[in-house]
Structures are given as C-alpha cells and as structure tokens.
Image: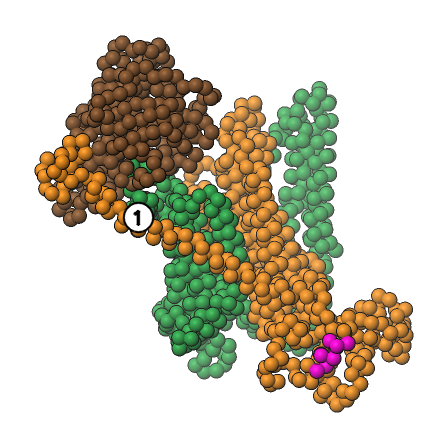
Chain colours: A green, B brown, C orange
Amino acid sequence: MMSPLALLLALLLLSAAGYFIGRRKALYAADKAGGPNMLHSRPNYYGVLTALWCCLPAFFLFILWLAFEQSIITSLMVADLPPGLRNLPQERLSLFVNDARNLASGNIVSGEITAEMRAAAAHYVNLQGIGKMIAGVTVLVVAIAGMLFVHRHITPELRARNQVERAIMALLIFCSTIAIFTTIGIVLSVLYEAVRFFQQVPVTDFLFGLKWSPQMAIREEQVGSSGAFGAIPVFAGTMLISGIAMMVAVPIGLMSAIFLSEYANKQVRAVAKPLLEILAGVPTVVYGFFAALVVAPVIRAGGSQLGIDVSSESALAAGLVMGIMIIPFVSSLSDDVINAVPQSLRDGAYSVGATRSETIKHVLIPAALPGIVGGILLAVSRAIGETMIVVMAAGLSANLTANPLQAVTTVTVQIVTLLVGDQEFDSPKTLAAFALGLVLFVVTLFLNIIALTVVRKYRERYE
Amino acid sequence: MQEVLKKKSAEKRILAPRESRKTIGNINVQNPRMVCRNVDVYYDDKQAIRNVSIDIGRNEVLSMIGPSGCGKSTFLRCLNRMNDTIDSCRVTGEILFDGKDIYDSSIDVVPLRAQIGMVFQKPNPFPKSIYENVGWAPKIHGLVESKAETDELVESTLQKAGLWNEVKDRLDQPGTGLSGGQQQRLCIARAIAVSPEVILMDEPCSALDPIATAKIEDLIDELREQYTIVIVTHSMQQASRVSQRTAFFHLGDLIEVGTTENIFTKPSHQLTEDYITGRYG
Amino acid sequence: MSSVAKKPSTGASGGSGRERAIDIVNRRLAKRYRVEKRFRFYGLCSIIASVVFLAVLLTSIVGNGYTAFFQTYIKLDVALDATMLDRADPGGSDYQGIIKKSINKLYPEVEDRRSKRELYALFSSGAAFQLRNTVMENPDLIGTTVTLWVPADDDVDMLMKGHIKRDVPESGRRLSDKQLGWIDRLAVEDRIEKRFNVTFFTAGDSREPELSGIWGAVKGSFFTLLITLVLSFPIGLAAAVYLEEFAPKNLATDFIEVNINNLAAVPSIVFGLLGLAVFLNFFGMPRSTPLVGGLVLTLMTLPTIIIASRAALKAVPPSIREAALGVGSSKMQMVSSHVLPLALPGMLTGTIIGMAQALGETAPLLMIGMVAFIVDVPGGFTDPAAVMPVQIYLWADSPERAFLERTSAAIMVLLAFLILMNATAVVMRKRFEKRW
C-alpha cells in the first residue's frame, strides 16, 4: 500500500532519474555519431523529454484514479453485499453505503452499527487496500514504461526540443483553460441542483413568491409543511442591504478618489492610500464581527435614545459596514478611471479659467463617467455576493420590508444557513440553496460582464 | 498624452548652468499688453528659461520660434500660469499684466486665465456637445445667464471662429466628433467665448493638415483686430505669415526679437540666421 | 458689436462705457470659491471618514482583544498521593479527583455538595489534563506535593479582567457572592494571577474558552494555503505566460479572458457551491479538510494571480523579447530565460496578494464543511481542520463573554499575518520595480 503523497514523490524521483538517463543516452548517442554537436537539441532537452514521458502519463492515470477511487470501490462493495441488502430501495441502500463508508474511515455513523455494516466496512477497507496497491503498481509501471519508450527512441536526430516545447505548450494551454472549466463547473453544479429544485418547486413560485420559510421542510411526513420557497423577500433584503452599502460607498469612495487624485499633495496621498488599502485588505469576517459587535449595538442604542425600535440585526448595520468595506473598492476603481482622463482635458478647462471643482464636476466626471459607472456596477456585484458581513450581522427571517431598521435576510445568508450543518440531500431545503446560488451567479455574471465591457471600452477610448 | 510627453521632454532637455545670453533687438513696444522682465523658469533645480525679457504689444501677433526644446512652450505656459499644474515648476522674475505681476500672491489664476486664454497643440475639446464646449466657460464665469444669452453668445463666438456654418445644424453633437481642424477651431472658439484679452497658442496647427492650417491662420489674422495673440510655432513660414513680431528662442535663452520682416530678412544673430536658413532645427 | 449693458466686450477693443468681461468674472468669484471650498471639504471629509472607520475598527478589535493574551491562573498545591496514582500506569488515574481533593484542602470549610460544585467551577476542567501531563512527563513526582498554576474557569477570568461586574445583583452575574468570596481569598493568598496565555497559541478549539487556542486554525490555514499556493502559482503562471506570450488573438482566447475577468468578480460563496457539488459530492473528497479548502481557494485566487502575472509580463519591454529572438533562441527559450525572470517579482507580488486574499476568505469554506467544531490540531492535508477566519466566525457565534475577547485576539493574529504578507508584497514591489 502506498499513500498518494508517497506515490507522487516516487513519481517525482523516477522523473528525475529519467532526466539523467535520457540526457546520458543522448550524450552517448552523440558521441557515437561524432560529438555533442551532432545532437539536434541540447542534451538537457533529451533529459526533460524522458522525464516528461515518465511522469505525464503516469500522473494523468494517478489523477484519474484519485477522482474515481471512491465510486469504483463503493460499487465493488455494493456488488459484494448480501442479496438482501443489495435489493433494498435506493435511498436505504445509499444510506447504508454511506454508513459503512463512514465506519470504514472512522467517522461518526448516523444509525446503529449492525454486523452487516461492519462486514461491509471491513470489505470496503480491504478493497481500498487492494485498489491502492493496484493503482500504485500501475502508475509506477506506466512511468517506467514511458521512460523506457523514449529511451529507446533517443537518437541524435530526435527533435527533442521541439517535442518538449510542444508538450510545454500543451500544458500552458491546459492551464489557461482552467478558467473555462471553472465557469463550466460552476454553471453545471449550480444548474444541476437548481433544476432538481425546480422539479419540486415551480420556478414561478420561487421567483415571484412572497413567502420564504424553508426551515419548515425538515419534517417531510407532515402534511402541508413542505416549506415556502418564494424568494422575493430574500431578493428584496439583498437589494435593501446592498442599496444601503452603495449609498455609503459610492459618495465616500468617489469623493475620496477625487480628493486623492486632484487635490491631495504627495504627502497626503502617501498616507491615505495605504490606509485605504488596509481597509480593503481586512477580511470580511472581521467586518462581520465589527458589524455585529460594535455597529449594530450603537445603532440600536441610538434608536432607543430617539424612541425608535431598531432590530439588533438591522439591515442598516449590515449595510453600513458593507458600505465601509466597499469604499476602498470604489475609490481605487474611480481613481484609476479619473487618472486615465488625459491631462489635456484638465488643461483645456483650466485655460478658460475654470476652478478645480468646476473642472472636476463638468469635465473630469463626465469624461470618466462610463468608467465610474462600470466600477460602481462591479461594486454592486460585490455587495450582492458579500457573505460574511450579512451572515454575522443580518437576520435569518425573511421579512419583506423596506425599513432599514428591521431585520432582513439576503441570498447569501440563506445559502449559508441552508447548507451549513446537517444536510439532507434531495430535500428542497438543500436544493433551494443551489437555486439561490444560480440566481446569485447569473445576476453577478450579468453585472460583471456589463461593467467589464464598459470599463474596457472606456480605457480603449483614452489609450 | 501629448501634453504630458511634451512636459517630460521639456524637463529632460535642460542644460548645464551658465550665464544667459543677451537678447538682440528691441524688446520694448509702445503701450504693451504684457511685460516680461528677467523671467527664469526651473523644473526642480534645472533651469528651462534664462532671464527672458520681452514686451507683448496690443493687437499684435507675436510668434515665438526656435528649435524644439528651446523653451518657447514653457515660456508661453508661464504667461497664464498653466505651469501651476506642474508641481516641480518654479517661475521667478516679473510678468506684468495690467501693471500687476501675475505671479504675485494677490493674483487669482481663475480670472487671470479668463483674461488670458490658451489653445493647445493637440485639439482638446471637452467630451460634451459643441454647444456646451463653447457655452460652458461663459456660464461658469457668469457672463451669460439665460438660455437666450447663451445661444446668442455661442452663435457669435462660433461665427468669429469661422465654424458656425459648418456646425450650426449639429450643435448638440459631441465636439470630439469633429475633424481635427474643426476641433482646433472649436478650441479657439472656446477660448474666445469668455472674451479674453490675450490668447496664447501653443503650436496650434502642428496636428493639422495644410488646409485646416490655412483656415486657422486666416482666423488668427482676423482675431488680431480684437485680441493680442502669442503663438508658438515650429513652422517659420507660419510665423512669417501670421505674426508682426517674432522672438527667437534657443536653449532657454531669448536670442533675438524684432519685427517679423526683419527677423526673416536680415537677422542680426548668427544663430537666428542659421535657424531660419535651415542649418539646424 | 452690440452694446447691451451687460454684454461684455472683448478687452482689447473695450471702450470705457461698456463693462469689461473681467469685472463680471470678478464679481462672481467669491461665490465660485465658496463652492470650490465646499467641494474640497467634502473630499477631505470622505478621506477622513474612511480613516476614522479604519481607526474605530482597529481600536475596537484591539480594545476587545488584547486581554485575551493574558489568562487567569490559580496556584494549587497538589499532593500526588501514591495511593491514588498507579506508578506503572500513571495515565489511567483519576486526576480530576486529585485536583478536587487539592481544592478541598484549600477550602476545608466547604462541605455540602452544592457549594463544592460551585467551588470546583472556579477551576478549569483543563487542570486535570495539566496535572496528568505533568505526572506523565515526570513519574518520579508521585508521592510528592507539586505546586501548579492551573487555568481558572473563564468566568473567573472575566471577573479578573473586569468584564463581570461585582456591583450587579447576584442573580445577574455568572458568579455567586460565595464564589466571589473564595476568589477574594485566593487573591489575598497570592494564589491567583494573570499570566501570558500560552494555551491560546498552542491549543486547538475547545468548548471551554480558557482551553481554546488558535494553533489548530493556524495550522489548518497553513495546510490550506500550502495547497492553494502549490496549485495556483504554477497554474496561474502558466496561464498568464500562454495568454500574454503565445496565445493568438482569436475568439477562443477572448473567451478565456472574459472568463478570467468574470471569475475574478464572482462572489466567493459561489466557489463554495462549486466545491460542495464537485469536490465533495461528485468526487467524494473528505469534508472539512485543507485539501478541499485548498482546491476551492485555488480556483478562487487563480484569476487574481493570472491578472497580476499578465500585468507583470506586459511590463517587460518588447525590446528584451526582440533581443532574445535576435540571438536565435526559440520563443519558448526567450520566455523562459529572459521574460520570465524579469516578470517573476511582479508575479510573486501578485501571488502573495492572492494568498492574502485566500487567507482571509471564509464564505466558500463554510460551504465545504470547514465550520465543524474541531478540537484536534490537524496534522495533514486530509485531517478535518478549521482555518483562522472560520475559527473567528465560530467564536464570534459563541455566547460566552470570554470568546468575545478570543475572537478579537484571533482577528489580531489574522491581521498580523495579512499585514506581514502585504508588507512583503509591497517591499518586493519596491525592490524590484522596473529597472529599465
């Protein structure tokens, strides 16, 4: 048996050995043909080529195995179960398999441990061992075979450099397509679960329903307690909090950027910019803690001073702190676009006797407007997707209200509460999180693409 | 961008400290509009203009010529304190306008620039409509109050700039959509809309084709009746066509001043002669 | 020219009867400058507001958190009675009983069961573990009496730090009058004092505030970030090199670019959903582990690293590329031996910034189950672990007052790491800033 890490290490060592073997073979072959200058490529390339042949196919196999190890072994185990168990209904069987697997890996088991389960677990461990062994041996054999294969083919005429470069190029291309795979992965994973959700809850009910209480769905047997999945209150809460955040972040961020780029002298800039960067670098969980610990109580106390009842999880507190979080984001994006406005426009305005603020308000901002709008859209997208601040400072109950002093909930809060803790797969409660995730992804995608296009067009105009 | 590059190049082409050279020719005019005496300009520690003294007369076109990097643009930008926007720039000496030193602490650049307008090398209309390009500055200065007044001013100004017939049907379209020559005339219109007394032009035709250049030169000739114009140009033909007096700069010094005719027909200084005959430049 | 009274004339031809434009300009000047001042003032206020927010944030964290670095300990004389301890197997003894006996000896007058329970509650349950460790390390102590400083219960700690007020009526505080009396006696006898809180830096999570620490979370963060770094740096570098140096300008590469730019702005929680659906449910990887956390964070930070690396590559002047190609190297050789070394500092800076982002990220990790309560300090990539921000989130959710200061202290530790990383990035950027 070999742990994956050890196997990987062995593979690495083999490749290193391959490098030297290949290099030596090339030098040897060259010697026979009349000196190292007879080689098509430098000897190192033959070494690298050998190493690549040694590790790439084997590594590919290794990844495949890692990815499918569990499903293969599980299906083997299921196949060897006593017939009584094997013919159980699908849900019961998968529950049993899960338990057995948990038992095998030493985790907590949901139900009672039966003898059959113990046997299945033992079998599972056994299969796992055999599987690891086979995988290890196969990977190493493939590695050595690859090495030997190139070794035989090394001649002075072999265009090793071209082959190595082609392999590296393929690797580079693969790496740059990971972004596409990630997007596809997001879309598929979210869409797949969301579609299953929409099979149970109609899309229109979800998008236009006014009542959201997914927690009811836990007890499935109860009549009429399938939960309510009308997401309008959740969307409204998200918009309320994001709106408050933007009302804080846009004016302050924009004015900060203007002040820093048009008014502040070098010293002020040298101090203020790093401070804004620190504000940008503070993790959102810290902002969440700050909102819940400091801001919410202050607002609540202020409210009670004025005789207004403020919820301890008011939208105002979460929105305010989210706004603070987004200030540096808006400010740095605006700073970029304002600086991209050519100096000649400023000169033009100053030359007719405009004051600084007149120049800024009537020339710079109109000129930079597309860029600023793009930046604000990105900030909105960020506010909508922000999670930790609202999880820690906003409420759970979905109130449909525009009152910022009440508690509201947001899309991200709901995703977190629905998915953290014990999950039941296939229950609409869990799947609803993915439906919300789908909405979140689509909306932010839309905002991002508009914003990025606008900003790019803007930059091209002044480049 | 062009402007920035120009600034940079001006900063680079600075010479080792030395005595300024004496100006040949008569720097004085009768009843001058602006008077410059012993003007020095520094970028940080480096001197870009050395001890320049010259008068600028009323209703004349004064052209400033010289090889690139000679400081003529730098000097021009001093005349309405556009150099203020460059942090490292420092000006000493006297530049009198209406008898007052424009670098005096009591002088406010905003009204100063309303009186001494400027046209730049590269046309830089605001990203606004043609109408607003002309009407904006009078509006902020309070020279017009109603829409009717603005309409009237925009029309008369564009007519003065010789642009009215070309744009009267599309006043609401962006100024950046015009051709290069039209844009430059729009910038001139923008400058004269606030009724300045002096207009500074920094190589206004260098980015234009010959036909557009000819139009601008005609315009300069017409404007001379009402305004004092100082024009920096690298084209000696242009200087001889549009100006009455010419000043020749070389490496930060004002070498020679005189009537345009004299400068181009019988220059006194060897450098001037070499330059106008094309030995270098 | 018409001579309407208001209409300005141009200066040069301006006669005496007409108003000069400059007079109108001057008349309005004061008003314009008021607007100017006000505008400038708004700008200044915005900057000041941001700075004040930052200051309030930091002071409230530090103010709440610095006390957590000290912890109340009580001196206890423990008689290691040979009859209660098995020399052969010291691990199996009833250390809780020994501690209780020592406490009883300190307060012989406390006799009834309820009072005794209240008395024992002053001491942390960690005292028994500490005693056990002491004995295990040195079995020769059996039969002697040792003096131990054992951790006090978090309520006692809170009292000592002033967070539990004595002037509140008894029913309103977590310590009874009787307990206060005992504590006062400890104080008189110099048996109680605040010491540097080593536990906080060496322990994992615990239900008992006084026994909890962030070491587990720090190690969890370390393993997670290691995975992230090992995967995202080479992949990001490769992607940037391809897109910047080799990629043809066509629809496919445009599509990749759009994807990367968009992924950089996708909410982080969506990456968590991806991790849950793909890594956990589809590939069946183990929940709550640094391995999966690292994978998710890799996908999340890749766009940042790619964008920064491309900027670094763009900054390498084309002349260097031409020079390399000019001496007959292949494009790959040109990139690997000339362009990459020059761009590397910039790429590393971008990577550090991406890592700092990943270190502070919480939401996607919640999705893949890294919110479990984990006592053990993780020892590897597949052990269940928490990371620092998640630990902060968990503690922030705990009701005990003592966790409040621990949350703040953990935030201070996290911020210290972040500042360290960002400072490194800044120094690198300064150090290797363009030399051409």
Magenta span contains residue C383: no
Question: Can see residue A228?
Answer: no
Within 10 Å of disc 1 (Cα), the crowding (few <14, some 14-19, many 20+) is: some
In-front residue for pair B90/A40: B90
Q: Is residue A411 above or below residue B40?
A: below
Q: Is residue A77 above or below residue B270?
A: below
Query: What's the magenta region?
Result: C181-189
Residue at 50% from the left image edge and 81% from the top image edge: A221
Task: Measuring from the top left, give residue C150's x and y in whole percent.
Answer: 76, 72
Q: Secondary structure at mark 1?
A: helix
Residue A27, quarter of picture? top right
In-front residue for pair B179/B135: B135
Task: Measuring from the top left, give residue A328's x and y in whole percent.
Answer: 46, 53
Task: Measuring from the top left, give residue B171's x and y in whole percent.
Answer: 18, 41
Question: Can see residue C107?
Answer: yes
In-front residue for pair C188/C321: C188
Residue at 28% from the left image edge and 37% from the top image edge: B113
Name the residue type under label 1: Tyr
Q: Is residue A421 above or below residue A167?
A: below
In the rendered view of the protein, which quadrant contains the N terminus of chain C?
top left
Residue C349, quarter of picture? top right
Judging by the rendered image, the residue that carries numbered circle 1 is: C33
